[in-house]
Amino acid sequence: MISRRRYKLLADFEKVSQFLDDNYNLETLNSYLLQQFFEYAHTHPYFQYQKTHHFGLWEEGEKIVALVCFEMELGEAFLSVREGYDHLLAEMLSYAEKELSAETDNKKILNVWITDKEKKKSELLLENGYKKVYTEPVRIFSYDKNFVDSEIPDGYSMFSLEEENDIKKIHSCLWKGFNHGPEPDDNYDQRLLMQSGPNFRKDLSTVIKAPDGEYACYAGMWFDSQNRYAYLEPLATVPEHRRKGLATAALTEAMKKTKKLGAKYCFGGVPEFYKSIGFETICLREKWEKKFITGRKEN
């Protein structure tokens, strides 16, 4: 007997995290809904935690067999299902349309993320009026390859957050590194929040300090001991310190640490930078969109 219920943020986080690890598959990537992706979102300041009761869980006894959730906010959906339970997909999509759609001005919209390896999901989306509107590569660096040699310039220093963890400097680095502007705000609590996840590792997070003492580059790294992979999130370099090899050096240092822990490869990002240092595309991440007007599909 399979039952459905709403997600309980405090009670279900660990259980869902284990489900995502158990359900991991390098071939399809299960819509690229990795446990680290799920956890990182939960500690992100933009995460709509007050809306997580819209997530849906399907259980067989005490075992989770399917999950419907968003990453950050309403208007997007991931459909994660165990092997052998694909018959639930149609019900899951219907649930997502009801619970996770964003509504503005009598219109509803839902974006569903899958990979190009998930044929059953793409067929279901086509049948239900969705259109593929965006694709991006999913890239990994195999640890069977040699790491790129990259030395940091004189005057710069590299260390982990175990050695030094200046929240104000981290905030400034990430604010500027993600091009939010030259003058960061003073919301340091968001950076402390982002270090609060149960699997956040200070020893794997790498910082490069500039000669003036400010942080020039930051690379956050996660390690999945069950499935033996590393996951990079986030990576940012302050604009005036770019094109000096800092990002390559910080990322490579973090990857070397996870290789020693037993990881076989690392997930990277979308920009061509990753391809240039040896990351390879293993599949495409796809966004499928459906718009509604007062309950009807928009023409």
Image (cartoon, helix red, strand yellow):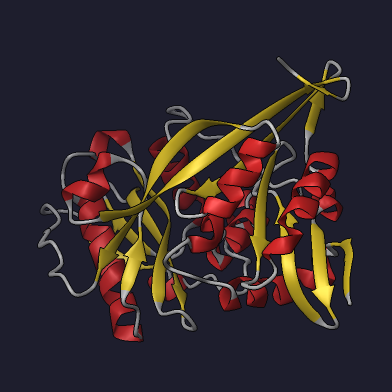
Left or right, 268 with respect to 23, comes to left
Residue 205 appears in the rendering:
yes
Q: Nearer the viewer, residue 247 or 146?
A: 146
Q: Position of residue 124 (x, y in %)?
A: 65, 45
Image-based side of 219 in relation to 292, left or right: left
Q: Quadrant of residue 174?
A: top left
Q: Residue at x 53, y 71 (%)?
A: 24
The percent position of residue 113, horizontal first and vertical second, equals 58, 45
Taking 291 as reference, is 207 above or below it? below
Q: Nearer the viewer, residue 67 or 14?
A: 67
Residue at 48 percent across and 70 percent down: it is: 25
Q: Residue at x 64, y 58 (%)?
A: 193
Q: Please, is residue 105 above or below residue 73 in the view?
A: above
Q: Quadrant of the C terminus?
A: top right
Point out residue 273 in the picture as x, y percentages from the top left corner.
Answer: 24, 44
Q: Is residue 192 above or below residue 298?
A: below
Q: Quadrant of the N terminus?
A: bottom right
The front one of 245 and 131 is 131
Q: On the image, which quarter does residue 14 sit in?
A: bottom right
Quarter where residue 87 is shown: bottom right
Say which residue appears at 78% left-offset and 36% top-offset: 101
Q: Is residue 34 left or right of residue 223?
A: right
Q: What is the total number of numbered labels drawn onto the structure image?
A: 0
Q: Is residue 162 visible?
A: no
Horizontal and vertical percent position of residue 88: 75, 61
